Amino acid sequence: MTAWAELHLHLEGTLEPELIYALAERNQIQLPYTGIDDLRSRYDFQDLQSFLDLYYTNMQVLLTEQDFTDLTDAYLARAGQAGIRRAEIFVDLQAHTARGVSAGTVLHGVHRALETSQDRYGISTGLILTFLRHLPAGDAMLAYQQARDTGVPLLGVGLCSSEVGFPAAPFAEVFDRARDDGLHTVAHAGEEGGASYVAEALDVLKVERIDHGVHAIDDPALIERLVAEQIPLTMCPLSNVRLKVVPSLAVHPILTMLNQGAKVTVNSDDPAYFGGYLDDVLAAMHTDLGLSEAARRQLARNSIEASFAPDAEKAALLQLWPAV
């Protein structure tokens, strides 16, 4: 038996077309597509924004607590098949409250599935509240308070959405508050934006992990820092290809950075939109990047070590992998 931790997974990005249509029927919502095939045909993205436009449109089918439970449970079932034993899941709360769905509806629905995931699927979980960086930092603070008021346990906070033109610095206050409350911190950086965005997230937000970090490869001094400090990078190769962050999987820097000693991990990001779940990503890496068994084991161990799971749980999961 082997084990992986998935550390970069947007719950809303697991919303498969079939579930979109099932929830639309349940909630009597008219979708702007002629059918599932038409919807799937729109998954040829030109950039991050073209993906986000569809991503936010499809969220309209998520209205009730049961909808969020069903969405979460569907991901966990598929994650278990992929060998995931630890999942730290992003939820974009602001995208739902902006539609009039309460924080309690969202988070209680998600939590209901997460609290049974260990027993049902053998997956331990944590919930990370992600702030949308294209919205004002004051909105993030409000979302954080709304989330805390629900009483649903949070593992951490993060920063996501459109990167270029939306610096991380304005979010320092809400990150400081979350840290003071004992939560972990992560942030998307170096996906659309260059290496300077990675440095800003580290220096200003003081995050423990960088989500993506592809463009860190462009700055040798930054790579040296990431290696020296063993700052985890939650990389998403198929996502980067689909959003044209890199021209093809064959030139993705993930294995180069791994060989340089960076603590890179592999994740699926938004698997319903980007071509597959963790096992699909690994299969593609084997085909296009020549992923070796030694590199595969190291990526798995990195994912467990980079997780925010308790030390005893990490130790137990690491025993499932032979030493590299």
Image (cartoon, rainbow, N blue to C red):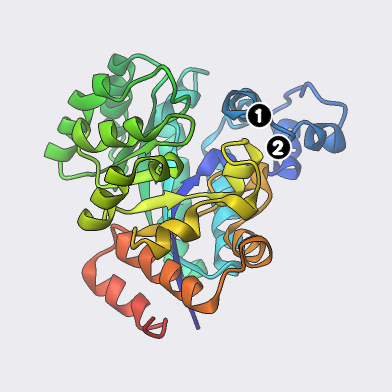
| Left or right: 95, with 189 as reference point | right
Taking the image as shown, residue 296 lies to the left or right of residue 318, namely right
* Of residues 46 and 54, the one drawn nearer to the viewer in this rendering: 46
Query: Is the Cβ of the residue at disc 1 closer than 8 Å to that at disc 2?
Result: yes
- Residue 154, position in %: x, y? 30, 44
Q: Residue at x 46, y 50 (%)?
A: 235
Q: Which residue is mark 2?
A: 20
Residue located 16% across and 45% down the image: 182
Residue 43: x %, y % from top left:
73, 35
What residue is rendered at 66% in x and 26% in y? 54
- Residue 163 shows in this picture: yes
Q: Residue at x 76, y 33 (%)?
A: 25
Circle 2 — which element? helix
> Horizontal and vertical percent for residue 87?
43, 57
Q: Is residue 319 above or below residue 313?
A: below
Give, as a three-letter code, the residue at label 2.
Ile
On screen, 213 above or below 136?
below
Distance, label 1 to label 2, CA atoms, is: 7 Å
Foreground pick, 168 / 24 = 168
Report if residue 148 is visible in the image: no
On the picture, is 6 further left or further right than 131? right
Give, as a three-letter code, the residue at label 1: Asn
Query: In the rendered image of this protein, does residue 5 appear above or below residue 38?
Result: below
Which circle marks residue 31 in the picture?
none
Q: Which residue is mark 1?
A: 58
Question: Dividing the picture into quarters, in which one does residue 181 lie?
Answer: top left
Mark 2 Cα-neighbour bin, 10 Å: few <14, some 14–19, many ≥20: many
Disc 1 element? helix
